[in-house]
Amino acid sequence: MMKIKTPMKGRVKRELDKRAPKLVETGKKTLILQGTKTSGTLNCVLSEIYHLKKGGAVRYTRKNDNIRPFESGGETSLEFFSLKTDCSIFVYGSHSKKRPNNLVIGRMYDHHVYDLIGVGVENFKSIESFSYDKKIAPRVGSKPFIAFIGEGFENVDELKHLKEVLLDLLRGEVVENINLAGLDRAYICTAISSNKVYLTHCALRLKKSGTVVPRMELVEVGPSMDLVVRRHRLPNEGLRKEAMKTAKDQPKKKVKNVSSDAIQGTIGKIYIPDQKVGEMALPNKAKGVKRERRE
């Protein structure tokens, strides 16, 4: 049996608690790495994904011979890098004769591979190939709109899985409130067929509409590409239930002496202890109270 070492220092224990699975997830970091052989197109794709995820991504540029997703034993190094960098989602690029310009996107649970989907990149256009006004270029770290167009995202299992993975990859940290002035980009995913999706990145341009609400226009700023679904692997049912566990609604603690009424609202009772008037000290005693001095 393997010996489990418990952390002795508080700093190490706090760091391990940060990396442990949580009921309420924080922002997911992305690990970007490549295999033994890549093409120029694939290197550009990985670089631009890293640029779009700047601040929430880690990029490895060395070749990795021992990483082979979808194969038994080929995911050990991938899980090690996920633990080392504390990344919950990864993008892996490889190029071969059988699968040219292959991109594997996967998610992690407790730093173990949760699910995988492999896509082929076609008709790629980089950011430099688009001409537009640089003033409307999206700012780094801004929250995006994500639109999925097409019935395939609801009917085809492969596209439904791709939609879940792309949402986790592109949306960044989940927040409750957002400033509308910071929304300056949108990702448009269009299902062309049952296994092909057109992905493009657009900037939002606000124009006058004669009303308080401005009129929005989409300006394509790149990158854009076609993603052809090749293979995918869903998690088993037990792992899915464990990963999708949510916190139960905590019952509210009963507050003493407080009740609610539909008409009167919240009603509270206040208990005042008995006042001992005879023992109270009077600050200014009246003359009549004082005992007269007798001669």
Image (cartoon, helix red, strand yellow):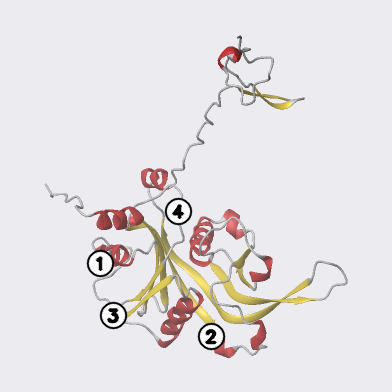
Determine whether, in the image, residue 57 is placed left or right of residue 167: left
Q: Which residue is mark 3?
A: 63
Q: Are marks 2 and 3 in contact (CB under 8 Å)?
A: no
Q: Are marks 3 and 1 in contact (CB under 8 Å)?
A: no
Assign a secondary structure to mark 1.
Answer: helix
Relative to 103, is 87 above or below? above
- Which amino acid lies under the numbered mark 3 shown in the image of this protein? Lys
Q: Residue at x 36, y 79 (%)?
A: 95
Structural crowding at the residue carrying mark 3, measured as other residues with C-alpha within 10 Å and reported as few (<14), some (14–19) or many (≥20): some
Marks 3/1: CA–CA distance = 12 Å
Residue 125: image location, x then y, percent = 55, 84
Q: Earlier in the sequence, mark 1 or mark 2?
A: 1
Q: Earlier in the sequence, mark 2 or mark 4?
A: 4
Q: Earlier in the sequence, mark 2 or mark 3?
A: 3
Q: Which residue is mark 2?
A: 126
Structural crowding at the residue carrying mark 1, measured as other residues with C-alpha within 10 Å and reported as few (<14), some (14–19) or many (≥20): some
Residue 214 quadrant: bottom right
Q: Residue furthest right?
A: 210
Marks 2/3: CA–CA distance = 23 Å
Marks 4/3: CA–CA distance = 31 Å
Q: Which residue is mark 1?
A: 77
Marks 2/4: CA–CA distance = 32 Å
Determine whether, in the image, residue 92 is placed left or right of residue 128: left
In front: mark 4 or mark 3? 4
Q: Which residue is mark 4?
A: 25
- Which amino acid lies under the numbered mark 2 shown in the image of this protein? Ser
Residue 122 has which mark?
none
Relative to 295, is 107 above or below? below
Marks 4/1: CA–CA distance = 24 Å
